Amino acid sequence: MGASAGGLEAFEQFFRRMPADSGMAFVLIQHLDPNHASLLTEILQRATTMPVIEATDQLIVAPDRVHIIPPNRDMAIFHGALQLSVPDQPRGMRMPIDAFLRSLAEDQGEKAVGIILSGTGTDGTLGLRAILGAGGISLVQEPASARYDGMPASAIRAGYATAVLAADAMPHALLAGIRRIARRQEDRPAAAPVGTMSRILMLLRTATGHDFSLYKKSTIGRRIERRMAQHDIEDMEIYARYAKENPAEIQTLFKELLINVTSFFRDPEAFVALKREILPRLLRDKPDAYVLRIWVAGCATGEEAYSIAILLRELMDESKREFKVQLYATDLDDDAIVVARAGLYPPNIAQDVQPDRLQRFFLKDDAGYRVRKEIREMVVFAVQNVIKDPPFTRLDLLCCRNLMIYLEPELQNRLIPAFHYALKPGGILFLSPSESIGNHTGLFTAQDRKWKFYRATHSVASARAVLASGLSWAADSGGKAPEEVMKKARETNFAELTRRVLLQSYAPASVVTDLKGNILYVYGDTGKFLRPAPGRATLNVVEMAREPLPLELRAAIFHAASQGGVTLGREVAVTTDGEVETVSFSLRPVPDTDAGEAVLVISFQEMSGAAPGTRKRSKRESTSLANERIEALERELTYTRENLQATIEEQQASNEEMQSTNEELQSSNEELETSREELQSINEELVTVNAELQAKIQQLAGMQNDMKNLLDNVSVGTIFLNEQLVIRRFTREAARVYRLIGSDVGRPLSDIKSDLEGEDLLARAQTVLDSLIPYECELRTVSGVWYLARIMPYRTVDNVIEGVVLTFTDISKRVEAEAAVQTSRDLAEGVVDTVREPLLVLDGALKIVSASRSFYRNFRVAPEDTLGRPLYDVGNRQWDIPELRELLETILPRDRSFEGYVVEQVFPAIGRRRISLDARRIAGRSGDTQLILLAMQDAEMSA
């Protein structure tokens, strides 16, 4: 799942509707600030009961778990494990979503699901193309429901969305798709509906003219099932009827079957081998200006064809050799060919094309990158069916990658001989790593087995194999009888023969040029009128013309180009090999040509001299007039040349200034473009951080409300002070101790009058701030209310001391209760001391709580040896009497009291005594023993 700006809201909507036991594993790729810790894990955990964790390197992806990319990391998946890496550049136009989706398509194939949610830019578009090519599912958020619709709109425009849904509607569609895949896997052993699929393929052939019967049935089946899922159709028979009734569905299915999965320099090492080894070997013995013929079959949207063109341009520049390149690229998909001809690709290609190539061969556009004109002009794109239409021939290189993997072996075996037939002996066949030449080893010799470069070997077997292959174009060309061909060769075209003889005998020397004077065709001997211009080679007729023809030709061409005017019989004196000859030239526009552009026909003719008798009679007069005319023309020509030279020099200076300005503007534009990309990336990261912070603020607002209600309801007065003992905050109850109002926040506590008596809490607070040792005491207000005051250091989450906290707990009731207890205790002790007989007060554990004075006196023991000790341990354990134990531990708990029980014991200080014991148990509210009153007197006296 990929998202950028606004993605947090879409993620929450999605996971609130996604069950926790779907069996699917989720990986979230979000554009994050590389320098900011992500809160995405914590925020999304509140939207789902599935575990939400931040991914780590080599983490195995688990079902029913959400894995989130960490900040400043690129992520891929390999054999089900996440692979994390540090990006080369933390900011800029990185495409982490595309990178992960591509690796997902390679790793999981048809099990892959790609989802694109809210965000700006185009990240994820090429990743979805890879997933669709692998047979997976792609879902895109409906642009109207996305906070930012850039990424969803890009994927939809490119045609890579299986379904376009709101984020909260995607879980239902996903679960339905998973159930459909599960049923398909369960039903896979059953026989495939061959008849139904054949009817669908027949509908396709009727509607489009293309036969897909020899495409792999698994590929066709997946594409048909994807269309069935779009229409929520379960049975292929029902879909066949639906397609028959809806011709538009047939066209859509046709586009689905055309798999346009490609990229620039796909398998980069293969293109390195092509540039460093294959092409140099291929061109080693070729002369300059050699016509290099290349065919890229199944070119899709043209990335592979342009990649080869770029390699050729680099190779020619590096070797300083120029070849005439005829690079043909064909595909069955006319929409893909339109894209290829335009040469405009999304910004995502930056991850496939090296930066130096991107700068040299591409122009940055608002919509992405456009291939420069010099590379586009090297490639001719055309719609072609490689199975049905005849191939290009006499090829030096034939590139057909990742096409045959979708074809049945029968059709592959037909294509390989056709490719051999199209190649020159020694030509190179370039396949993908997943393809091979099969059993046609006699037609090719392997040049690089890893990257599948094969060299065509000369063999007549290929022609026989092509004729026997059953390809429609081979059958058509082989159907003509040899006699018919020979008869056609013997026919003579007398009209053409007559025209050719007349032109050779009577037509003047001529050239055909475009409207700028560039020569397109030369007829006859033009050596007396044109010659190669010094300096850089050119075919411009004005620059090649002998003096003084250029001036007249330039004017005539301008007249014809601007007004369509004709120039006839213009005579000019031309000096050739030291002799002056009169030359007449004519210029005629020819508007209708096959190219659709007007051209010019310029004819040159030598003028014959006057009759000899005439020259003799007026020789002196003619010479004088001619000399005057020549001098006038030379003066005019000199003046014109000087003006023209000045104009040319000014124009050259202006051109140089414009060129310099243009280079500066180009440099500034590139810098601005780089800055714009960085700002866009930072903006996306800021939007993501802002969304996370907004969620955090909402969480903190809730916590603040909880904290306020907590402080208001615990009835504890609290004052927060900073390091200078200035009030930061206080609770309502604190106003009963200090006379505080809302505006006192920010004032020193020493400015506020307190109702407390005695203790100086501010001095204590400063001591706590210095020593970090808490302090507490009980204080009384002037109104008689008692408080337990505590002073504690104020610690932040990072364990930094930033002040102190004063709390005041009302303990008035406790103080009153303690006073009442003390009064009762004093009263009880007074009663005990007043009784004449010895009396002990025991607790539930038989420890002595209190003893009367008569007890100390009669038994001669001291209070410090008695109070708080178990009865049996007093003295020398003289009270450890078995009968007394039974009375206190067995009889008393049962009967609550006993009286007149006589025991006899020897006491060290007073000797043997017989004592009469009376006891009563005082129970608490729960029935447990609280106190025991044990009275004793001398048994003889009681008797």
Image: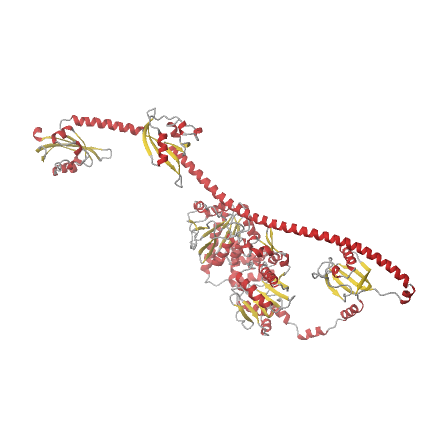
Asked whether the viewer can see residue 592, the reply is no
Report the front residue among 418 and 690.
690
Asked whether the viewer can see residue 642, the reply is yes
Give the quadrant of residue 821. top left
* Left or right: residue 496 compared with residue 224: right
* Left or right: residue 91 compared with residue 798: right
Depicted 39 relative to depicted 240: above or below = above
Residue 722 picture location, percent across and down: 41, 34
Depicted 851 relative to depicted 161: above or below = above
Report the front residue among 936 and 747.
747
Q: Residue placed farthest to the top in the image?
A: 783
Where does the C terminus fall, quadrant-wise? top left
Residue 352 picture location, percent across and down: 54, 57
Q: Give the image's coloring scheme.
A: secondary structure
Residue 857 picture location, percent across and down: 13, 29
Residue 277 picture location, percent across and down: 55, 66
Depicted 427 relative to depicted 734: above or below = below
* Left or right: residue 409 compared with residue 728: right
The total of numbered circles placed on residues is 0
Residue drawn 38% across the image and 30% down it: 734
Residue drawn 56% across the image and 72% down it: 443
Depicted 660 relative to depicted 921: above or below = below
